[in-house]
Image: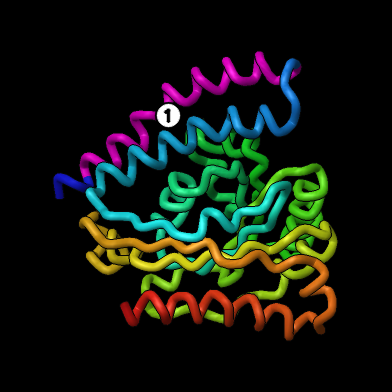
Amino acid sequence: MFSSIRTFSFLFGYLPVAAVKLKGFQKKKPHLSRDEYDRLVHTEPLKWAAGIMKRTKSEVSVTGLERLPEGPVLFVSNHEGNFDIPVILSSIPKPFGFISKKEVKKLPIIPVYMEDMNCVFIDRTDRRSALKSISDTAEKLKEGHSILIFPEGTRSKGAGISEFKAGFMRIASDAGVPIVPLAIKGTADIMEKNNNKIRPANVTLEVLEPIGPEIYKGMPSKEAVRFVQDTVEQALDMHSDK
């Protein structure tokens, strides 16, 4: 119970601090390059995410950071639980935005920060919105920003990986950027498996070998989607065997 109180108190208590920092960042924006501003904005979400994970008292093991390429990439990850984003934000030094459901816009401060992080909001109940999110995400990548997507669409809650939806492949193909698969395991043990009470867990995050356009564009779309999913599944299986 105390872990839950600590974590949620920090989650929302840090927002006023982040809001003040963001205003300061935005004043500097005209004087910075795109990459410089992305790195600057990323500093606060990183602190916020690291603070959240510290308060869950979870152990996070990260491998494969040396595989991160330069330039914009599409991160493609399996989706275990609500703590996937804090783990990835606090573990990967490369700035990135992500695709998020539109309901997040109702929260205070967070959506304003997400817009500066180049996040894309989607209404999953509206097919037109879903299609627009594909083109909006590809445009962010073309502009030089990295994006994270969870192609399962919903959390597995530790029940095993679900089928990847094909939209991410269209995004990557339109933008012509490398796909960087991520394999995350253990985040569901923090909350989802505990009746939504926060408990310490052992979490692993592995950055897998980038898949360049020269590889996936040479495959039929369904085959390419399956190839990325198999890559993530194989990495998760290896972590399960350890």
Three-letter code, disc 1: Leu
- 126 with respect to 56 (left or right): right
The percent position of residue 234, horizontal first and vertical second, equals 50, 81
> Is 235 above or below relative to 62?
below
**Residue in the foreground of this view, choosing between 2 and 229:** 229
Residue 94 seen in this snapshot: yes
Residue that extends furthest to the front in the rendered view of this protein: 66
Q: Is residue 26 within the magenta segment?
A: yes
**Which residue is at a point 77% across and 58% down the rendered structure image?**
177
Q: Is residue 159 above or below residue 84?
A: below
Q: Nearer the viewer, residue 124 or 64?
A: 64
- Counting labels gives 1
At a point 60% along the width and 41% down the height, the residue shown is: 95
Which region is colored magenta?
Answer: 5-30
Mark 1 crowdedness (10 Å alpha carbons): few <14, some 14-19, many ≥20: some
**Residue 228 appears in which quarter of the rendering?**
bottom right
Comparing 140 with 228, the one in front is: 228
- Which x, y percent locates residue 34? 74, 31
Q: Is residue 149 left or right of residue 83?
A: right
Which secondary structure lies at badge 1?
Answer: helix
Q: Could you say which is closer to the camera, residue 201 or residue 211?
A: 211
Is 222 situated above or below 111?
A: below
x and y percentages locating residue 237 in the rendered image = 42, 81
The residue positioned 76% from the left and 46% from the top of the image is 140
As drawn, is 52 to the left or to the right of 130? left
Most prominent secondary structure in the magenta stretch?
helix
Q: Which residue is mark 1?
A: 15
Instruction: Please identify the quarter of the rendering in which residue 84 is found.
Output: bottom left
Q: Report if residue 125 is visible in the image.
A: no
Q: Position of residue 112 (x, y in %)?
A: 59, 32
